[in-house]
Image: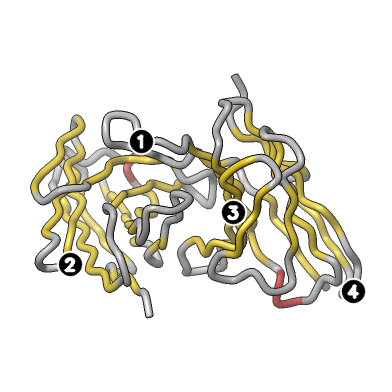
Amino acid sequence: GQSLEQPSEVTAVEGAIVQINCTYQTSGFYGLSWYQQHDGGAPTFLSYNGLDGLEETGRFSSFLSRSDSYGYLLLQELQMKDSASYFCAVRPGNQGGKLIFGQGTELSVKP
Amino acid sequence: NAGVTQTPKFRVLKTGQSMTLLCAQDMNHEYMYWYRQDPGMGLRLIHYSVGEGTTAKGEVPDGYNVSRLKKQNFLLGLESAAPSQTSVYFCASSYSKARGGIQPQHFGDGTRLSIL
């Protein structure tokens, strides 16, 4: 089958750094994406890794190791507004842009 | 530029009733998707479309039908609603080709559907 695993909850304080891990088992792999969702609203795209290594976008970075079927999202200089759910998603094939989503990690940022 | 618009935002149905959820996008995206999200779970793909007049099954297609008569619209139908279909439904769209290696999906605000 196809599955993604990520922690269900993470708590951190304002200004800190937090890492959300994602491991995957899929029949194919065309990249790992990360999405953010506030309070059950529309998920929004954060980052994408198609190749091994680190991608940086402002305070957010994402890492991928295809040999380990593993990736992570790194959030630096945490702000209260970063409290949200974060989903990793794998594109298992090169057809139709389909994504398989993890169950999500709820990040709580405390003052 | 509205992005992805879903209607209605909320709906309560009785078991056995039918309804159609509407999704419209104004970004000229080729691909469109319907997901459901249940508490504590990620998004699960119901059906998707790679272009006008085409549809395909996702992970959890049973009990749902879809149609894409126009490029900008993707309709999700429940022919005979069941309590197990109580969920939040999200529509998304994307380009068919990655731009700069990225092919993000753009989501609507969701439809909260309760089946009694």
Element class at badge 3: strand
Q: Residues within 10 Å of mark 3 (few under 14, many from 20)?
A: many
**Which subunit holds the residue at mark 1?**
B
Q: Nearer the viewer, mark 4 or mark 2?
A: 2
Whole-percent x, y for residue B57 in the image: 60, 64
Residue type at mark 3 is Tyr
Q: Nearer the viewer, mark 1 or mark 2?
A: 1
Q: Which residue is mark 2?
A: A69
Kindly report the distance in space between the C-alpha atoms of the residues bearing marks 4 and 2: 43 Å
Kindly report the distance in space between the C-alpha atoms of the residues bearing marks 1 and 2: 22 Å
Q: Which residue is mark 3?
A: B48
Q: Which residue is mark 4?
A: B16
**Which subunit holds the residue at mark 2?**
A
Q: Nearer the viewer, mark 2 or mark 3?
A: 3
Whole-percent x, y for residue B45 in the image: 54, 61
Q: Which mark is residue B98?
A: 1
Q: Residues within 10 Å of mark 4 (few under 14, many from 20)?
A: some
**Which subunit holds the residue at mark 4?**
B
In the image, A109: left or right of B50? left
Same chain for the residues under marks 1 and 4 in the image: yes
